[in-house]
Amino acid sequence: MGGHVEYFFSLNKHLQVLGFDQDENARKIAGERLENFIEKKQFTIIPENFKKLEEICTNKNFTPTSILFDIGVSSLQFDDGERGFSFRFEAPLDMRMNQNDTLTAKEIINTWSQEKLQHIFYTYGEEKHAYLITKKIIQRREKQLFETTTELAEFIVSIKPFSKKTIHPAALVFQALRITVNKELEVLETAVHQAVALLQKGGRLAIITFHSLEDRIVKNVLDTYISKEKINKYQQNSTTDASTANPKLCLKKISKKPIIPSQHEQSENPRSRSAKMRVVEKIL
Ligand SMILES: C[S@@+](CC[C@H](N)C(=O)[O-])C[C@H]1O[C@@H](n2cnc3c(N)ncnc32)[C@H](O)[C@@H]1O
């Protein structure tokens, strides 16, 4: 939505910025907020996925001095009752960040195999009851398909063993579905490799994540550029497309630990509570 970019321009009004977002609504708000800088050709909105970062910057002959990823779902997406991200609002099971993508949460829940569903609930939701929930979903969808967010959320409430935890019983399944629909973790790994490759020497990369699965990926990928031992281990273990990346020692950490929001920021903006930002500098 251009919030960070507006702040960057307030620090330096001569910047040239490319702003990527795959969500049409977020781009519209950024466009209105930064109209001035668009007219002056200093801000360009790129309606693309982060995985196109390297291709687009290379085509534009643009070598960034800084890259910021603020990843995950926005409040705008969560709080828009029609997008299907939240179990708080009745909506079709959608969850696409990019409204032109074809895969929806509804397709996943109603057509994917028991094995695949259990895998995503367990891996992307870290849902301990993945087996039970999946088995019941399969039984129920044989009689009646799932259509809406609230239908799925109420179904999970009815089958999941009672937990003293404060989070909603359906929260982890919803998280898993959202990550799967948007291929969030695969894209994150690829995009971080691309950002490291693109950055100018002396340039900085900052990545804000909102849960441990994302932060672990960011930490692991960045480490492959920071420690020789980790490079070897990564190259042996990686099974994703990003394994074609050829990490070499070229980054240093700017802060030892991830930066987290102050108490003041957390009380002003409770959704910032889980945010972590890692910052590195390209040294070679
Ligand atoms: C946490 S919000 C960021 C808010 C923004 N930084 C601001 O200042 O208002 C994340 C945004 O990134 C977008 N996004 C997430 N993953 C993406 C991806 N792989 N490619 C493009 N945009 C993505 C989402 O659509 C969402 O609008």
Image (spheres, rainbow, N blue to C red):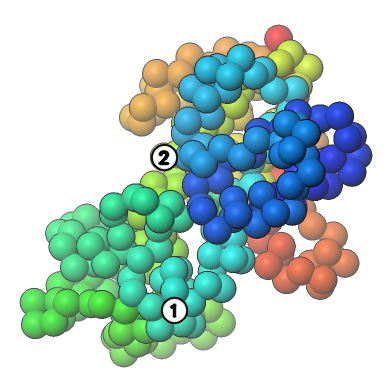
Q: Quadrant of the C terminus?
A: top right
Quadrant of the image occupied by residue 177:
bottom left
Q: Is residue 27 above or below residue 219?
A: below
In the image, farthest residue toward the top: 284
Marks 1 and 2, Cα distance to the nearest angstrom? 25 Å
Label of residue 18 in the image: none
Q: Secondary structure at mark 2?
A: helix
Q: Does ligand 1 reach within 8 Å of label 1's beta carbon?
A: no
Front residue of 49/256: it is 49
Q: Is residue 51 left or right of residue 64?
A: left
User: In the image as oriented, which residue stretches furthest toward the left?
Assistant: 142
Residue 21 position in % (x across, y down): 56, 45
Residue 145 location (% of width, % of height): 17, 77
Mark 2 burial class by Cα count in 10 Å: few <14, some 14-19, many 20+: some
Among all residues in the image, which is located at the extreme front?
Answer: 39
In the picture, the quarter occupied by the N terminus is: bottom right
Badge 1: how crowded within 10 Å, few (<14), some, or many (20+)?
A: many
Position of residue 17 measured from the top left corner of the image (x, y, whole percent): 72, 33
Q: Nearer the viewer, mark 1 or mark 2?
A: 1
Residue visible at 59% across and 65% down?
76
Residue 202 in view of the camera: yes
Residue 96 appears in which quarter of the rendering? Answer: bottom left
Percent of width and height locating residue 94: 35, 66
| Residue placed under numbered mark 1 in the picture | 87
- Rendered view: 73 above or below 283: below
- Disc 2 target residue: 186
Q: Earlier in the sequence, mark 1 or mark 2?
A: 1
Kind of residue at badge 1: Phe
Q: Residue at x 85, y 60 (%)?
A: 262
C-beta proximity under 8 Å, tags 1 and 2: no
Q: Decide which of 51, 23 is in the foreground and name it.
A: 23
Three-letter code for the amino acid on which mark 2 is drawn? Glu
